[in-house]
Image: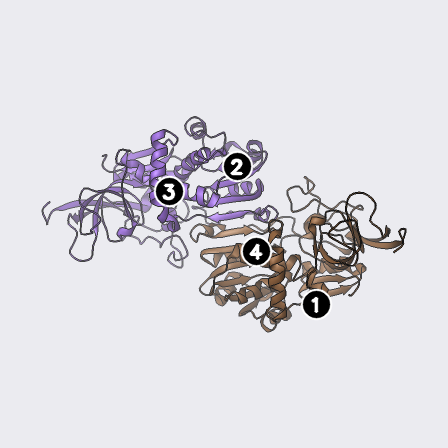
Chain colours: A brown, B purple
């Protein structure tokens, strides 16, 4: 590649900070250029992004916080300046590298941006893809951040035992579908909730959940849980927060673990739902733990091997919702909050 | 003692189930008789109770729950039939025993009733008192259930490290005063809140807290915590629940532990406070754990030796609020909910 080669680089930019429900108009796609060579200086890796990830937690960064987001997972996005991310976790191909561990042509996933090309200087957040025999897009899902979140949260925080009763909310989503299948592998009885009959059907027919309910057609979530899990819940993997979490707390068994991976029902609210059932943690000796994957990356290699094995054996199946082209990214992201996606939401930039 | 000897046995009986704030009239003292000999049959221990304990969690059993209290710590009290307890944890003296491990004259604490004499058949919940050189009343407090709760919750769930920032709510109370002093022994920086200037003064002058505030004179609890702990909280031992817990959640540091031993602000409410800050558990990777001492009794002997040592060395000091006679018990119990007690609330039946 010629040292001076330049390409266009489309990026998603935040146009304004968001209050309430995000809209397409809050973002825009701008066209920039990128030199296809890593500049001289400290080691860096130029990645051409192939699949971008749409994740509910990105919503938090679109708000303007008084402290700039210091108390949040990551700082607020800066209007007009940054692409939406980093940190984002796309899958991509190395175009050029001055880092000894990466070379042109390597397939990678990790910390990158919502754009076509990203110059990654923090290479400790970039992972080489070992299982190139599997669909590359899996590394922006089941083998990437969301699959790893499901694995580390369920195994390390949930600590499943054979026969445990497990409830997964938002169960057809990126984290939920993997958590539910891991629970089946661990010998648990697994119930999942989702927001449409189509998704509920997927839970049973594709992912092997033992029982399910559509939370949008239930008038009493606690009663729905009691119906599906009359003996209560040992492990609750929560991706919803709010009323679902409140109902779950009422149905936990002695010593139960509530692993909170997300609270998608809360991200667009100006005032958070007031949880009234937290008092149950005392009589039932419950542990409620917020999961943040940052502390678990040392386990990634073990996870990658284990999960690749499950996929090849057919023990874990994958449902993805893929849209094409970076121009589709803002709409796809917003769709998460009305539950438009079925399975892990991806944006394919180039199919490889 | 003659085999047919009989004594009067005053007991506290629940007159009616309670809604909202409990009143003296909800309980009454009845006079019964007791044969001072364990009846023939399975092994049992007849205990003369010397010190009764008043504990906030007893309030839950005074309500009538739809499920009879099955989902609570212990079943609802039955009106007119049961004394207030068991399980209660008084200190007493064995009068007669057919159990091989106990003999007349032994001093014990454990599962017993709010009455003058209790026939204990579940002797696995009865502990022999080893440190008779210490005030006997300590076994209904710092060396009994509340001290043990503070120890096991702080050490096993809180897992303190030297230099950790610790916050204890209701810090002059039975659990709080012990948790705060254990935190100092562990090399932590400890802040406590209490509901009167007198109690706040105790925290500093008696118990060695580094900083304190009177929560009743603060308009913004989160700001008070930020003022006392500008770098945030690593371990929060909560005895309050409600608004205090909500403010604490906002001030936790990455990886913080919230050990919830009680929620005294909530026990008399018909509708629980709605917690709005639980979402912070995700970005801060927080663990919120409800503490129930039932799972920890295997540690009791270790605790008894360690705590007796701290008391003798003056590293743990004790403040108790003792009233005399079983007739005073209902008023003393109710006083907990308006914060009338200063320190652990006891009822002395016979001073030994």
Residue A76 spot, x, y in % from top left: 71, 45
Residue bearing mark 3: B148
* Mark 4 and mark 3: Cα distance apart in space: 31 Å
- Tag 2 subunit: B
Residue identifier under label 1: A133
The spot of residue B52 in percent (x, y) is 29, 41
Q: Disc 3 is attached to a residue of which chain?
A: B
Crowd band around label 4 with a 10 angstrom C-alpha radius: few (<14), some (14–19), many (20+): many
The part of the image, by quadrant, that contains residue A95 is bottom right
Which residue does the numbered mark 4 point to in the structure image? A153
Q: Which residue is mark 2?
A: B164
Rendered view: A106 above or below B141: below
Distance of label 4 from label 1 (alpha carbons): 26 Å
Q: Secondary structure at mark 2?
A: loop
Instruction: Work out whether residue B1 or residue A306 is closer to the camera in this orientation and state it.
Output: A306
Q: Are marks 4 and 3 on the same chain?
A: no
Residue toward you, B114 or B89: B89
Residues indicated by labels 3 and 2 sit on the same polypeptide chain: yes
Sequence-wise, which precedes: disc 4 or disc 1? 1
Mark 3 closeness class: few <14, some 14–19, many ≥20 residues within 10 Å: many
Mark 1 falls on what kind of element? Answer: loop
Cα separation, mark 2 vs mark 4, equals: 25 Å
As measured in the structure, the alpha-carbon distance from the residue carrying label 1 to the one carrying label 3 is 56 Å
User: At 10% across and 49% down in the image, what residue appears?
Assistant: B3
Marks 4/3 in contact by CB < 8 Å: the verdict is no
């Amino acid at each position: 590649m010629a040292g001076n080669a330049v390409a266009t680089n489309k990026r998603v930019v935040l146009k304004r900070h968001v209050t309430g429900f995000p809209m397409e108009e809050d973002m825009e796609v701008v066209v920039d250029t990128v030199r296809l060579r890593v500049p001289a200086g400290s080691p860096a890796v130029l990645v051409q992004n192939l699949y971008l990830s749409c994740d509910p937690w990105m919503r938090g960064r679109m708000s303007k916080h008084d402290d700039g987001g210091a108390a949040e997972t990551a700082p607020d996005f800066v209007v007009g300046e940054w692409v939406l991310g980093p940190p984002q976790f796309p899958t991509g191909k190395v175009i050029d590298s001055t880092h000894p561990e990466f070379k042109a042509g390597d397939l990678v996933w990790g910390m990158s941006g919502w754009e076509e090309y990203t110059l990654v200087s923090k290479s400790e957040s970039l992972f080489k893809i070992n299982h190139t025999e599997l669909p590359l897009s899996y590394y922006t899902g089941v083998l990437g951040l969301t699959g790893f979140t499901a694995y580390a949260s369920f195994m390390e925080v949930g600590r499943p035992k054979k026969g445990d009763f497990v409830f997964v909310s938002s169960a057809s989503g990126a984290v939920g579908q993997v958590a539910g299948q891991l629970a089946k592998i661990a010998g648990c009885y697994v119930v999942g909730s989702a927001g449409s009959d189509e998704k509920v059907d997927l839970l049973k027919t594709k992912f092997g959940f033992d029982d399910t309910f559509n939370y949008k057609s239930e008038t009493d979530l606690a009663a729905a849980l009691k119906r599906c899990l009359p003996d209560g819940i040992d492990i609750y993997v929560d991706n919803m927060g709010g009323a679902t979490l409140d109902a779950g707390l009422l149905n936990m068994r002695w010593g139960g673990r509530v692993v909170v991976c997300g609270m998608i029902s809360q991200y667009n609210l100006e005032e958070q739902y007031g949880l009234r059932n937290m008092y149950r943690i005392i009589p039932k000796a419950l542990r409620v733990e917020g999961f943040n994957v940052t502390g678990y990356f040392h386990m990634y290699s073990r996870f990658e091997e284990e999960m690749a094995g499950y996929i090849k054996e057919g023990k874990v199946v994958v449902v993805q919702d893929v849209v094409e082209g970076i121009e589709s990214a803002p709409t796809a992201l917003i769709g998460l909050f009305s539950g438009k996606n079925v399975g892990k939401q991806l944006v394919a930039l180039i199919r490889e």
